[in-house]
Image (cartoon, rainbow, N blue to C red):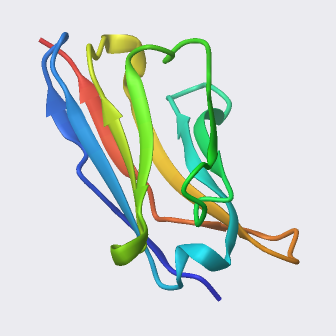
Amino acid sequence: QVQLVESGGGLVQPGKSLRLSCAASISISNIYGMGWYRQAPGKERELVARITNPGLTNYASSYADSVKGRFTISRDNANNTLYLQMNSLNPEDTAVYYCYCVRFGSIANYWGQGTQVTVSS
C-alpha cells in the first residue's frame, strides 16, 4: 500500500498562485509515474500534469493543454514529495485536485484524499 497525503489547497483570487504538495509513504525511486488529476463539479476527472520516472534526475513531465505555461510539476526525492506550482490561476481551475502514483511492476493507481482549490474574487 502507498499513502499519499495532499496539502496546499484553498481559496485564491484570480491571477494568484498556489502550490500543492503530495507526500508519499514510499520512496519516489520506487514509483514509475506520479502526478495530479482534478475534478470540477459536474465534470470528469482530468489529468493535469504527471511525471514519469520521478526518481531520475532527467524525469519526463507532461501537462494538459489548459495548464501549460502556468503550472509546473516537480518532486523532492529527499522528502518523497510531489509538488504542483499553479500560477495565473483562473476560475476554470476550481476543482478538487488529486495526487496519484503507480509503482514499478504494478498497474494499480494509488490516490490521495484530494484537496480543494477554489479560484474566486
Q: How many marks?
A: 0
Residue drawn at the location 61% of the way across and 43% of the way down: 50
Identify the residue shown where x is 27% and y is 29%: 118
Q: Nearer the viewer, residue 42 or 38?
A: 38
Quadrant assignment, res 46: top right
Q: Position of residue 98 (x, y in %)?
A: 50, 51
| Residue visible at 66% across and 79% down in the picture | 30
Q: Is residue 48 left or right of residue 105?
A: left
Q: Is residue 76 left or right of residue 10?
A: right
Residue 41 versus residue 52 in the image, above or below: above
- Return the x and y of residue 65 as percentages of the image width and height: 61, 13
Whole-percent x, y for residue 27 in the image: 53, 82
Q: The C terminus appears in which quarter of the rendering?
A: top left
- Return the residue nearer the eye: 26 or 5: 26
Of all residues, the one furthest to the front in this rendering is 57
Q: Residue furthest bottom?
A: 1
Does residue 101 sit above or below 70 in this rendering?
below
Q: Quadrant of residue 73?
A: top left
Task: Give the answer, above or below, for where 30 lies relative to 17.
Answer: below
> Which residue is rendered at x = 50% and y = 29% of the image?
40
> Is 106 left, or right, of 56 in this rendering?
right
Residue 19 image-quadrant placement: top left
| On-image quarter of the N terminus | bottom right
Q: Which of the two residues, 12 or 72, is positioned nearer the viewer here? A: 72
> As rendered, which of 41 and 30 lies closer to the eye?
30
